[in-house]
Image: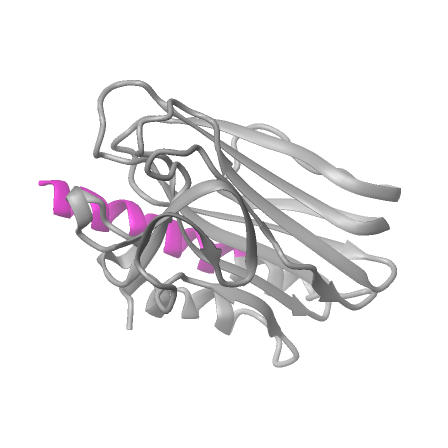
């Protein structure tokens, strides 16, 4: 089992028993391929690479399995999930791991992330838990998209755990889009461990435990990458 996956149990243990996974993709079972448009659970625009850990010096999360390079060989790409259904009044948590790509030179990679809905949705609560820099997301009625989050990644940046949550007031479906927009040099942001969970809205004490669990995952990822680089 991956190191990060094992540590993520801290976050899972903080969730109530009613927590369920409604979408998961760590790319480990996806076929190894360059410039592919075949990514299970996603529709691909352009091309992306599904790579094995250690390929050309790239480490996947936990230094094991496979991960996804958002700039294919040679196309800049993006992936959008198939609709992910959720129920009203549940706490929906979206998380993923993201790193820079050490294979190329100095230009930074541009990473884009978008959370949207297949139909306008009423959002009662929206919270950034970890990873995201600055502001993103909103609350209110009739929201069809949270817009695009953009971040510049230096090439050798280690994996960081990103997580956010929201509470919808009606049942619906969400869409996740991940993309690279940097130089078309066959080396883009590295994505791994995409996970969407659903649970009852926790009590305040459980929220604190959940935040601590995600913090442990992010810290472990940084330490793991630092020790490998040394």
Image coordinates of residue 34 in percent, x first then y, are 32, 47
Residue found 41% across the figure and 65% down from its top: 8
Q: Is residue 228 magenta?
A: yes
> Is residue 54 at least partly visible in the picture?
yes
> Is residue 220 at least partly visible in the picture?
no
Of 201 and 182, nearer the camera is 182
Q: Residue furthest bottom?
A: 17
- In this rendering, is residue 21 above or below 49? below
Image coordinates of residue 227 in percent, x first then y, are 14, 46
Q: How is the image coloured?
A: one colour
Residue found 34% across the figure and 54% down from its top: 67
In the rendered image, the quadrant that contains the C terminus is top left
Determine the image quadrant of residue 28: bottom left
Of 40 and 64, nearer the camera is 40
Residue found 28% across the figure and 45% down from its top: 222
Would residue 228 be found to the left or right of residue 65 on screen? left
Of 198 and 29, nearer the camera is 29
In the rendered image, the quadrant that contains the N terminus is bottom left
- In this rendering, is residue 159 above or below 153? below
Q: Is residue 165 magenta?
A: no
Image coordinates of residue 54 in percent, x first then y, are 17, 51
Image coordinates of residue 218 in percent, x first then y, are 38, 49
Would residue 152 be found to the left or right of residue 1 on screen? right
Q: Main secondary structure of the magenta part?
A: helix
Of 73 and 64, nearer the camera is 73
The residues colored magenta run 211-230
Determine the image quadrant of residue 89: bottom right
């Amino acid at each position: 089992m991956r190191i990060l996956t094992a540590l993520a149990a801290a976050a899972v243990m903080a969730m109530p028993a009613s927590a369920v996974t409604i979408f998961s993709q760590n790319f480990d079972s996806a076929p190894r391929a360059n410039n592919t448009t075949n990514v299970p659970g996603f529709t691909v625009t352009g091309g992306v690479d599904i790579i094995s850990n250690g390929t050309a010096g790239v480490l996947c999360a936990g230094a094991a399995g496979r991960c996804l390079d958002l700039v294919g060989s040679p196309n800049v790409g993006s992936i959008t999930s198939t609709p992910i259904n959720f129920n009203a009044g549940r706490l929906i948590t979206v998380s993923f791991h993201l790193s820079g790509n050490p294979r190329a030179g100095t230009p930074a990679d541009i990473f884009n992330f978008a959370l949207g809905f297949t139909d306008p949705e009423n959002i009662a609560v929206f919270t950034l838990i970890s990873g995201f820099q600055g502001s993103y997301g909103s609350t209110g009625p009739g929201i069809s998209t949270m817009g695009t989050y953009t971040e510049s990644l230096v090439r050798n940046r280690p994996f960081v755990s990103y997580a956010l949550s929201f509470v919808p007031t009606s049942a619906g479906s969400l869409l996740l889009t991940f993309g690279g927009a940097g130089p078309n040099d066959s080396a883009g942001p590295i994505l791994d461990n995409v996970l969407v969970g659903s649970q009852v809205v926790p009590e305040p004490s459980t929220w604190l435990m959940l935040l601590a669990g995600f913090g442990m995952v992010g810290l472990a990822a940084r330490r793991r990458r630092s020790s490998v680089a040394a």
